Structure formats: C-alpha cells, structure tokens
Amino acid sequence: MKAVFISFYEAFYDEVLEVLDRHGVNGFTSWPTVYGRGSETGEPHYGTHAWPTTNAAVLAFMDDAKVAPLLKSLHELDLSAEQQGLRAFVLQAEEMTDRM
C-alpha cells in the first residue's frame, strides 16, 4: 500500500478530485488551505496581501498498482499551469490491522 501526498495550487482542487475519482481513489484526507512555495521556481502561496493565493493538499492511500497511472494524470494537470505548481510524493504505508 502507498500513501500519495499531493500539494497543489488551490485553483486545482476540483481537478485533483476529478483525477482521484477517475483512478478509483475513494479515500483521502484534504486540507483546502495550506501555505508554501515551490522549491525551485514556484511562486509563494502565503494567503497574504503580497502573495494572496494559497495551496491545498490531499493525502490518499491506495494499492500500489494505482500509483503510476495516478501520477501520470497529476503530472498532466501540472503541465497545464506549471508556474502554479502541483507536486506528488509517494510513501510506503502500512494499514493497521489490529483494531483496539
């Protein structure tokens, strides 16, 4: 199982959810307002007067087989407005099997 963390420009929120739906990723947690800036060429998204836009983030857990197709679709979305930014990070995840 993998965890995919997606950080993106707030205007991409609906499009990111559409990508998740298209790839059958049903369970996720989202943060509709987060602040940050890209590591290389991204503009700051601080929600301030000088930098008024913000980012959003999604954390989704899925079977390994769904990851590569999802990342491809997210990359295509990122290319539609590269300066705004969309990044995805994949982490190994283990599901808790014993319920307390």
Image: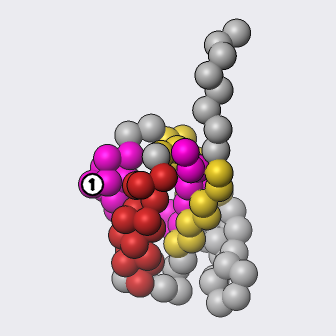
Residue 47 falls in which quadrant of the image? bottom right
Is residue 52 visible to the viewer in this orientation of the structure?
A: yes
* Residue nearer the viewer, 28 or 72: 72
Taking the image as shown, residue 61 lies to the left or right of residue 68, namely right
Q: How packed is label 1: few (under 14 Cα within 10 Å), some, or many (20 or more)?
A: few
x and y, in percent, of residue 90 in the image: 60, 60
Specify the segment rendered in magenta.
1-25
Colouring used for the render: secondary structure
> Measuring 52% from the left and 72% from the top, which residue is drawn there?
86
16 part of magenta stretch: yes
Is residue 12 visible to the viewer in this orientation of the structure?
A: no
> Measuring 55% from the left and 45% from the top, which residue is drawn there?
1
For the C terminus, give its image quadrant.
top right
Q: Label 1 belongs to which residue?
A: 22
Question: Is disc 1 placed on a helix, strand or loop?
Answer: helix
> Measuring 65% from the left and 26% from the top, which residue is drawn there?
96
Taking the image as shown, residue 94 lies to the left or right of residue 28, namely right
> Measuring 66% from the left and 16% from the top, which residue is drawn there?
98
Q: Which amino acid type is shown beneath numbered disc 1?
A: Arg
